[in-house]
Amino acid sequence: MYLRKKCVMKVERLDIEGLLVLAPKVFCDSRGYFFETFSQIKYEKIGIAETFVQDNESESASGVLRGLHFQAPPFAQGKLVRVIAGRVIDVAVDIRVGSPTFGKYASVELSAENKKQFWIPAGFAHGFVALEADTIFAYKVTAPYSQECDGGILWNDPALNIKWPIPAPIVSEKDSHLPSLNEYLKDPKFHYEK
């Protein structure tokens, strides 16, 4: 039996300026599904007028937390993230000094099932925790990686009060020693521009 279901692309603007959650059109039938993971023309129409220069992918075991990472100017990165297999809680923290939402975060569940994407512009620290084994996380970035511009904020900084769903995640040595938000303020890399 041939079944076809068409879902309309939805764009959700979060309470923190710049963050978008995208639910793309998915065409499903008895054979499986099809959807566009990226269309420059369509994404420009919703306000993502960036040039993406690289695609990245990682695989994580259940309970692995990666983040909170950012790249400072001149290699500041915007990220368009999604999950190919498994499920994550994805988090973006506003680190733009002077922003009305500085230090606040937004979290979104991304999964292979819901096929949502999360747009995180430059000026945010980003991280995620894998909720299932063999989770594959993919993302497009607007600037290449630069070790000199690599930065981050401690994932469990009490000042952020992020409600991670896993109390004791698996975290890399590097991510365990990232600076706090207060330490970041000693030499901030991003300033809010209205």
Image (tube, helix red, strand yellow):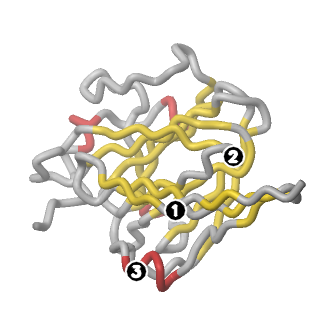
Mark found first going from the N terminus, 1 or 3: 1
- Marks 1 & 3, CB-CB < 8 Å contact: no
Q: What element carries label 2?
A: loop
Displayed quadrant of residue 27: bottom right
Nearer to me, 158 or 108 = 108
- Marks 2 & 3, CB-CB < 8 Å contact: no
Mark found first going from the N terminus, 1 or 2: 1
Say if 148 sits above or below 90 in the image. Answer: below
Left or right? Give the position of 110 relative to 158: right
Nearer to me, 144 or 6 = 6
Q: Residue at x 58, y 73 (%)?
A: 38
The image shows residue 174 at horizontal and vertical percentages of 55, 38
Say which quadrant the N terminus sits in: bottom right
Q: Which residue is drawn at 40% across and 25% down?
A: 156
The image shows residue 169 at horizontal and vertical percentages of 58, 22
Say if 25 sits above or below 185 in the image. Answer: below
Label 2 amino acid?
A: Ala
Left or right? Give the position of 13 relative to 43: left
Displayed quadrant of residue 122: bottom left
Q: How many discs appear? A: 3
Characterize the local packing of mark 3: few (<14), some (14-19) or many (20 or more) Cα atoms within 10 angstroms.
Answer: few
Q: Distance between the residues labelled 1 and 3?
A: 17 Å
- Residue where numbered disc 2 is placed: 112
Q: Which residue is drawn at 58% across and 64% down?
A: 25
Comparing labels 1 and 2, the label whose residue is closer to the camera? 1
Characterize the local packing of mark 2: few (<14), some (14-19) or many (20 or more) Cα atoms within 10 angstroms.
Answer: some
- Residue where numbered disc 1 is placed: 8
